[in-house]
Amino acid sequence: MAGKVFFSVTMSLDGFIAPEERMDDPDVPRWMAQWRELQQWIFPLRFFRENLKLGEGGEEGRDNDIVPETFERTGASVMGKRMFDLGEQAWPEEAPFHTPVFVVSHEKRDPWERPGGTTFHFVNDGIETALDQASEAAGDRDVRIAGGGATILEHVNAGLIDEFSIALSPVLFGSGIRLFQGVDAGRVALEPVRSEPTQRVTHLTYAVRER
């Protein structure tokens, strides 16, 4: 494996990366409002706007410098089926990955090619196979575990993560999907790599070591 395996997420101050999973009930507007509040730091950034084809312009600054680093290092991504199902409905035609994406799923499906360099491949025999295929596709670049939370945790507990970054957002959820709920803490040790506050969030990066 030439590159690193990493994940990068935004997390609330009380440890949640998404509201409770209620996308199929009448409370969808509340779910979306919470999610937007968590992610509000990234929406105005020039890179984010350009990557999602939202128009020209946007904010410069340190946040806008950090976000492209994640995309530039990523040669392929792995995600769970639930994240793909939500994204398939929400992503623009030119999905914002621009690399191969390997979806861990029980569904047998042909690769789904999108404009802009994103092709979704569906892997039916677990995270290790998906990660092997992603690593081969990534070459000497890194593999990002895109999400969701359960897929990230599965990779952490399997000892497959080399590094991760959190944008710590100054919001409180009280409930929702915890990033590290169920982590096998007895086997995971963390080594601080970077801690950098900006006006909206604090960027934290850790290397993962076996305890």
Image (tube, rainbow, N blue to C red):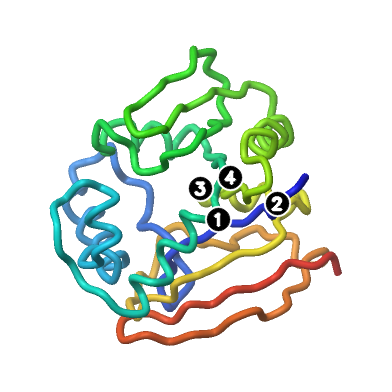
Figure check: 194 above or below 135: below
Residue drawn at x 50%, y 47% is: 147
Q: Position of residue 116 (x, y in %)?
A: 34, 34
The residue pinned by badge 4 equals 151
Q: Secondary structure at mark 3?
A: strand
Q: Amino acid at mark 4?
A: Thr
Q: Mark 1 touching mark 2, by CB under 8 A?
A: yes
Residue 147 circle label: 3
Q: Secondary structure at mark 1?
A: helix
Q: Amino acid at mark 1?
A: Arg
Q: Mark 3 touching mark 1, by CB under 8 A?
A: no
Return the residue found at the far right: 211
The residue pinned by badge 1 equals 73
Of labels 3 and 1, earlier in sequence is 1
Q: Position of residue 189 (x, y in %)?
A: 78, 72
Asked where in the image residue 205 lies, by quadrant, the reply is bottom right
Q: Nearer the viewer, residue 149 or 182?
A: 149
Q: Amino acid at mark 3?
A: Gly
Q: Mark 4 touching mark 3, by CB under 8 A?
A: yes
Q: Secondary structure at mark 4?
A: helix
Of labels 1 and 2, earlier in sequence is 2
